[in-house]
Amino acid sequence: MTVNNASVLTKDYFIAYLKLIMNSREYTLMEAKEFAFDFFFKGDMKLYDTSTWLQFEKALKELDKTICKIDM
């Protein structure tokens, strides 16, 4: 996925990105979160912008809710 440093990435972008990680690597959501933090953000939540990080967190929360509903 190509990233433009000048724009804020959306929650939907991160949902797609995290799902891709989870499906292709057979990771849990927490494993995908750690992978994205290390690989995408290079261990720095301010790398792209605080707004981008907030969208990432929103995506995590939404996926967590979705996964919890599926597990029930």
Image (spheres, rainbow, N blue to C red):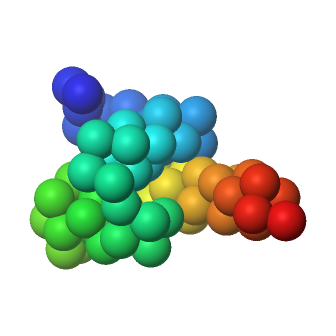
Label count reads 0
Horizontal side of residue 63 vs 70, given as left or right: left
Q: Nearer the viewer, residue 29 or 44?
A: 29
Q: Quadrant of the N terminus?
A: top left
Q: In the figure, 48 relative to 4: above or below?
A: below
* Residue 8 visible, this orientation: no
Picture residue at 38% right of the left edge, 43% below the top = 23
Horizontal side of residue 57 vs 7, given as left or right: right
**How far across and how far down the image is residue 28, in percent?**
44, 66
Question: Which quarter of the figure has residue 46?
Answer: bottom left
Question: Which quarter of the figure has residue 44?
Answer: bottom left
**How far across and how far down the image is residue 61, in percent?**
67, 63
**How far across and how far down the image is residue 52, in percent?**
45, 51
* Residue 21 visible, this orientation: yes
**How far across and how far down the image is residue 55, in percent?**
56, 51
Picture residue at 28% right of the left edge, 41% below the top = 24
Q: Quadrant of the C terminus?
A: bottom right
Q: In the figure, 28 relative to 16: above or below?
A: below
Picture residue at 26% right of the left edge, 51% below the top = 25
Picture residue at 48% right of the left edge, 64% below the top = 29
